Amino acid sequence: MRRKFISFEQAVNLQSEAASLLAGCEFEIESRTVLEPVRDSDCSAYACEFIALAMTLDTKLVTMDKKLLRALPNRPVALSAG
């Protein structure tokens, strides 16, 4: 929108479509599960939500986020190693 590639109304429609496609696929994560990796690293709570979700779902988090990979080497997996 800021770069004038799409209009405001197109953005609203795309967001609405994305929300409907994801409906029912949301997950609740306990705050403690998010805050523990925040405590143990210098990563943001936003980034650590993905770690917490992977832990909750008992799956791997595959990422290219170098900061996350360095800060929490035992939790996320590099895309190249996936």
Image (tube, rainbow, N blue to C red):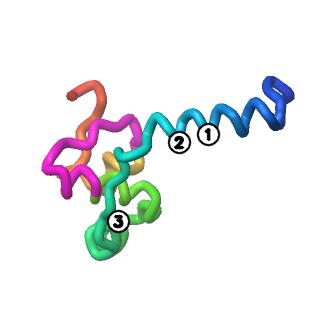
Q: Are marks 2 and 1 in contact (CB under 8 Å)?
A: yes
Local crowd size for mark 2, using a 10 Å CA cut-off: few (<14), some (14–19), many (≥20) = few
Which dot marks residue 19?
2
The residue closer to the viewer here, 47 or 56, is 56
Within the image, what quadrant is residue 78 found in?
top left
Which dot marks residue 16?
1
Helix or strand or loop: what does disc 2 sit on? Answer: helix
Within the image, what quadrant is residue 40 found in?
bottom left
Which residues, given as a range, are shown in magenta? 53-66
Helix or strand or loop: what does disc 1 sit on? Answer: helix
Local crowd size for mark 3, using a 10 Å CA cut-off: few (<14), some (14–19), many (≥20) = some
Q: Are marks 1 and 3 in contact (CB under 8 Å)?
A: no
In x, y percent, where is residue 45?
Answer: 44, 65
> Which residue is rendered at x = 28% and y = 54% of the image?
53
In x, y percent, where is residue 71?
Answer: 33, 56
Lower sequence index among marks 1 and 3: 1
Q: How many marks?
A: 3
What amino acid is labelled 1 in the image? Ser
Which residue is the site of mark 3? 41
What amino acid is labelled 2 in the image? Ala
Find the distance from the CA under tag 2 to the CA under tag 1: 5 Å
> Which residue is rendered at x = 57% and y = 33% of the image?
17
In x, y percent, where is residue 33?
Answer: 26, 69
Which dot marks residue 58?
none
What amino acid is labelled 3 in the image? Ser
> Which residue is rendered at x = 35% and y = 45% of the image?
25
Q: The C terminus lies in which quarter of the figure?
A: top left
- 18 left or right, relative to 12: left
